[in-house]
Amino acid sequence: MTYLYWYLGIGVSVLVIIFTVHQLTKSKQEQEIADLIAAFDPNREQWWWKPLNNFVMPGLAAAAVVAGWPVALYWKAKEMIEARQPPRTEPPQKKFEVAREHLQRQWTIAEVEAAEVVLDPLSAVPKAPFGHLNPAWEVFKQSIAEGDQLWGFSTVWEAEWRQNELREGYVIMRGDTIGPYFIARLTIISE
């Protein structure tokens, strides 16, 4: 029985230490987030919400810490160690860019619009260049300035999760500079 008293005594001590450390390290941002979550909770207007939220749940959490203090101590230590480590930076994702070797041939706007009209026998897609993508094409078309050239491109691109995609579309050439592009087709290539 003495071991049980020691175990529960250590549990109470751990509860007090964890509670104190949490109160001292709690940031203003965490409190604001907690207040926002509480404000969006539809149950907060119910008569039973405040006693449950303010007394019952903290009491159950305290009992769980006293009973399972080794686990609680491990979690709190792990949280404190992770807080001191610099944040992990994700490796930057490759950004898709059209390169000169991807260019195929020069097009005019009229040729592109004639070649890219979608013909759907069920009339689910508008009979317009690029179908449902027509509004995006119209915006892209407005970015073509005097003296720009419109080129078609096609390339295989390794996207996320090492998945290869065939990307085809059109790009604006401004002199020797490759400008904005419009992806007309993106096909996943199965390996």
Image (cartoon, helix red, strand yellow):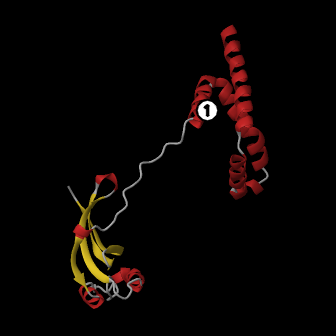
Residue under numbered circle 1: 80
Q: Is residue 61 above or below residue 73?
A: below
Q: Is residue 138 visible?
A: yes
Q: Is residue 70 left or right of residue 182?
A: right
Q: Quadrant of the C terminus?
A: bottom left
* Label 1: which secondary element: helix
Instruction: Report the residue that reaches farthest toward the front.
Output: 176
Question: Is residue 115 shown left or right of residue 86?
Answer: left
Image coordinates of residue 184 in percent, x first then y, are: 30, 76
Please determine whether, in this image, residue 158 is positioned above or below residue 155: above
Image quadrant of residue 155?
Answer: bottom left
Please state if 141 lies on the left or on the right of 163 as rendered: right
Q: Is residue 104 above or below residue 63?
A: below
In the rendered image, residue 30, in percent from the top left (x then y), is placed at 68, 47
Residue drawn at point x = 66 percent, y = 28 percent: 65
Task: Specify the amino acid type for callout 1.
Answer: Met
Q: Quadrant of the N terminus?
A: top right
Say whether residue 1 is visible.
no
Q: Residues within 10 Å of mark 1 (few under 14, many from 20)?
A: few
Residue 170, position as x, y percentages in the image: 30, 77
Instruction: Return the x and y of residue 107 as percentages of the image width and height.
Output: 25, 84
Q: Is residue 5 above or below residue 60?
A: above
Q: Residue at x 55, y 36 (%)?
A: 85
Please give the name of the residue rendered at 62% of the width and 28% of the height, measured from the top-left corner: 72
- Quarter-wise, where is residue 153 in the image? bottom left
Q: Quadrant of residue 123?
A: bottom left
Please state if 54 lies on the left or on the right of 89 as rendered. Answer: right
